[in-house]
Amino acid sequence: MNDTNMKLPRMLATLAAGALFGFGLSVSTMIRPEVVLSFLRFKDFGLMLVMGGALLVVVLAYQLAPRVLRRPLLGDTFQAHASAWNRDTALGAALFGVGWGLCGVCPGPAITGLGAGNWSLLWALAGIALGALVQGLRAK
């Protein structure tokens, strides 16, 4: 199949994956900041099971898919994504963690929470957008 014929299946697969991810966040109650903050205060370890399960699925998929499949279902080749750790990455990770700890909101669950009608998450998303804007302007 050429790239034009693969565009619709890729978009549908992306939509399905996003919907499944959002559903999982909702079912796991990660869209509720009070649940996340309770986890971060070591009072409720239910989200540890969610994160552990997600980690297990990702590790298995990244390790087994290239061995089982000759090529990806909707792509040409499997690719390794190199990551570079530097001062900016560490600073960004620290700021993300502090923001997550202060408000109990991560971008994915915040967007999913909006879909569930939790409009107060707009404040957290505004802060996330402002941080991304500042980082983008700083990187120029």
Image (tube, helix red, strand yellow):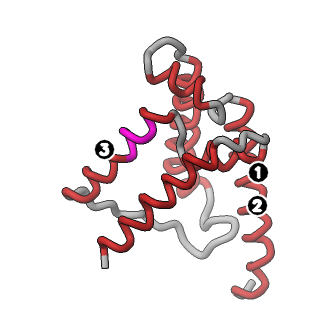
| As drawn, 96 above or below 38 | below
Q: Which of these two is toward me, 40 or 11?
A: 40
Q: Amino acid at mark 1?
A: Ala
**Residue furthest top in the image:** 43
Q: Mark 3 highlights which residue?
A: 94
Q: Amino acid at mark 3?
A: Ala
Mark 2–mark 3 distance (CA, rounded to whole Å): 30 Å
- Crowding around mark 2 (Cα neighbors within 10 Å: few <14, some 14 to 19, many 20+) is few
Q: Amino acid at mark 2?
A: Leu
Mark 2–mark 1 distance (CA, rounded to whole Å): 6 Å
Query: Tags 3 and 1 in contact by the CB under 8 Å rule?
Result: no
Name the quarter where the N terminus is drawn.
bottom right
Give the magenta part as a residue range.
96-101
Q: Mark 2 highlights which residue?
A: 15
Q: Earlier in the sequence, mark 2 or mark 3?
A: 2
Asked if the magenta segment contains residue 97, the reply would be: yes
- Crowding around mark 1 (Cα neighbors within 10 Å: few <14, some 14 to 19, many 20+) is few
Q: Earlier in the sequence, mark 3 or mark 1?
A: 1
- Crowding around mark 3 (Cα neighbors within 10 Å: few <14, some 14 to 19, many 20+) is few
Q: Mark 1 highlights which residue?
A: 19
Of circles 3 and 1, the one toward us is 3
Mark 3–mark 1 distance (CA, rounded to whole Å): 29 Å
State the residue at coordinates (70%, 46%).
Answer: 112
State the residue at coordinates (71%, 44%).
Answer: 119
Element under label 2? helix
Is 92 displayed left or right of 61 in the figure?
left
Asked if the magenta segment contains residue 56, the reply would be: no
Name the quarter where the C terminus is drawn.
bottom left
Q: Residue 7, image x and y in percent?
A: 74, 79
Q: Residue 33, image x and y in percent?
A: 59, 31
| As drawn, 70 above or below 62 | below
Element under label 1? helix
